[in-house]
């Protein structure tokens, strides 16, 4: 068959069900493309070719024997290297875990496999996912498919690059402050997260540790339909996840055919006060009419945040630092002293994060939760009147790559100081509120870098988010841009 990268994931799944495409052929094509292209991109940390081909042959036998096939049957997928695939190396982006191999699948990986997906490898992240780029001391930076001097954004950057470049039709990432939406924006793909708890993952040793701020497990695809399909497959409750949500009527794909007529959209060009470079702002502003053309009532609003963006970033940093300090505490039971004898094996900014978390008292933690509540109310106030909030994803279109592990975002945007780890991302507020949100391509800079539009909905409002994403895709299509990356 001709170049398989020209087909969407949904089309590939349909071809396999029709027996017009072999799962073996598709996985072989993916592995060949990874071998050819990833030497430049550095998107993959580990490629499990033998395991993937065994699964592809089993998938082909299922097709030929007439078995009932899952919605992702035979499709190659990539999994972020913070998440477990049984028998496949999981480094967490750290030299400390360079040889770590888990013996179980993450819950959502189990769901993907049951749907017929075939894991071909693990993708690059920042060290322990602590900053909004994909770079770490173990594997070095992941490179943007549209400009190899630039980072992919992160921390799920390897997955976003792999999808944009056509190495895989679908990939998974996680989002604790923008880690799906930021690389989706910078790599020109669709990143979609459901309401917190929609995709279950029993966290251990602390079952409650993914709440502050909320960590989402999410899909990345080249089209809205592909991302919505993968999100539905990943979704579902788990009795060992105290925050997991039950399956409800009206899944993400229900939004694919909905008109926006009657929906009210709040357009915030700065999400309540973040600095945004004009080229980014102009790209998002240029895509706003697509929503009105589909029938939505769009009004520019000011989100009344309870504090400055610098103060809110500092709060997010403290809350996430507590989780990283907890991780460092548990690592001691494995003989790993992250602030002692193993200090030189981790990056300086991660050491600073652990120290910040360790310095917080229980009272500090609860006081920050009060500020988080004020932010929650500020976002809820907008949703009292509007169905969706639309904004840029990031303050800047791109971040230049550094050397191994030291890539950071800007420390200043439009004359305002921002935290280089995450302060240039207009995303983390929604991790503090738990709302569903997505990034879809909105436009392009003069130099050819993608710019994403963030679309957020009410809690449990995934179909409306998908409907808005689909409207942008119909009226401002971007798929042909991938052809510029070559076949």
Image (cartoon, rainbow, N blue to C red):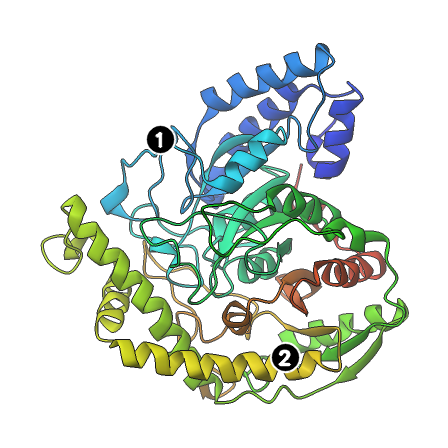
Toward which corner of the image does residue 328 lie, by quadrant? bottom left
Label 2, label 1: how many angstroms apart (C-alpha)? 41 Å
Residue at x 25%, y 65% (from the top left corner): 354
Evaluate if marks 2 and 1 touch, with contact meaning CB atoms under 8 Å apart: no
Nearer to me, 392 or 427: 427
The answer to whether residue 13 is left or right of residue 321 is right
Q: SS at mark 1?
A: loop
Toward which corner of the image does residue 270 lie, by quadrant? bottom right
Quadrant of the drawing holding the C terminus: top right
Toward which corner of the image does residue 368 lie, by quadrant? bottom left
Nearer to me, 119 or 473: 119
Q: SS at mark 2?
A: helix
Is the residue 334 above or below the residue 436 in the image?
Answer: above
Nearer to me, 456 or 24: 456
The answer to whether residue 115 is left or right of residue 338 is right
Q: Point out residue 230 in the picture as x, y percentages from the top left corner.
A: 65, 43
Q: Point out residue 203 in the picture as x, y percentages from the top left corner.
A: 40, 50
Q: Which residue is mark 1?
A: 103
Residue at x 14%, y 54% (from the top left corner): 337
Nearer to me, 2 or 65: 65
Is the residue 265 above or below the residue 54 in the image?
Answer: below
Question: If you read the primary sequence from the N terminus, does the residue marked by circle 2 or circle 1 appear first?
Answer: 1
Residue at x 29%, y 48% (from the top left corner): 94
Is the residue 97 above or below the residue 432 in the image?
Answer: above
Q: Which residue is mark 2?
A: 380
Q: Would you say residue 92 is visible in this rendering?
A: yes
In the picture as drawn, the residue positioned furthest to the front comes out as: 239
């Amino acid at each position: 068959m001709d170049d398989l990268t020209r087909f969407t994931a949904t089309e590939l799944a349909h071809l396999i069900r029709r027996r017009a495409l072999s799962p073996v052929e598709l996985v072989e094509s993916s592995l060949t493309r990874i071998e050819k292209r990833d030497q430049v991109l550095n998107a993959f940390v580990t490629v499990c070719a033998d395991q993937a081909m065994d699964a592809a042959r089993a998938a082909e036998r299922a097709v030929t024997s007439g078995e009932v096939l899952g919605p992702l049957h035979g499709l190659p997928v990539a999994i972020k290297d913070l998440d477990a695939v049984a028998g496949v190396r999981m480094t967490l982006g750290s030299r400390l875990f360079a040889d770590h191999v888990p013996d179980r699948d993450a819950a959502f990986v189990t769901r993907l496999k049951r749907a017929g997906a075939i894991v071909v490898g693990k993708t690059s992240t920042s060290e322990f996912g602590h900053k909004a780029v994909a770079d770490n001391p173990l594997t070095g930076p992941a490179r943007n498919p549209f400009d190899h001097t630039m980072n992919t954004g992160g921390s799920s950057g390897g997955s976003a690059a792999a999808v944009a470049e056509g190495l895989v039709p679908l990939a998974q990432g996680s989002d604790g402050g923008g880690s799906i939406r930021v690389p989706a924006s910078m790599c020109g793909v669709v990143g979609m997260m459901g309401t917190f708890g929609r995709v279950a993952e029993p966290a251990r040793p602390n079952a409650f540790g993914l709440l502050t701020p909320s960590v989402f497990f999410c899909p990345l695809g080249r089209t809205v339909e592909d991302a919505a399909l993968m999100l539905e497959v990943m979704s579902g409750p788990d009795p060992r996840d105290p925050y997991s949500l039950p399956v409800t009527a009206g899944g993400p794909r229900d939004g694919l055919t909905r008109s926006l007529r009657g929906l009210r959209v709040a357009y915030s060009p700065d999400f309540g006060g973040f600095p945004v470079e004009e080229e980014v702002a102009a790209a998002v502003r240029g895509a706003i009419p697509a929503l009105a053309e589909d029938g939505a009532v769009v009004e520019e609003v000011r989100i009344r945040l309870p504090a400055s963006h610098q103060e809110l970033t500092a709060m997010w940093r403290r809350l996430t630092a507590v989780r990283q300090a907890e991780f460092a505490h548990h690592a001691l039971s494995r003989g790993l002293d992250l602030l002692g004898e193993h200090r030189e094996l981790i990056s300086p900014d991660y050491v600073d994060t652990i120290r910040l978390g360790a310095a917080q008292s229980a009272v500090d933690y609860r006081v920050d939760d009060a500020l988080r509540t004020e932010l929650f109310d500020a976002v809820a106030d907008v949703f009292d009147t509007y169905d969706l909030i639309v904004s840029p994803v990031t303050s800047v279109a791109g971040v230049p790559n550094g050397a191994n592990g030291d890539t950071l975002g800007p420390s200043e945007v439009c004359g305002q100081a921002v935290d280089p780890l995450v302060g240039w991302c207009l995303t983390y507020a929604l991790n503090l509120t738990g709302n569903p949100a997505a990034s879809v391509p909105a436009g392009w800079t003069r130099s050819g870098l993608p710019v994403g539009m963030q679309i957020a909905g009410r809690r449990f409002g995934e179909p409306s988010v998908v409907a808005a994403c689909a409207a942008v895709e119909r009226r401002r299509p971007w798929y042909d841009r991938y052809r510029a990356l070559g076949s």
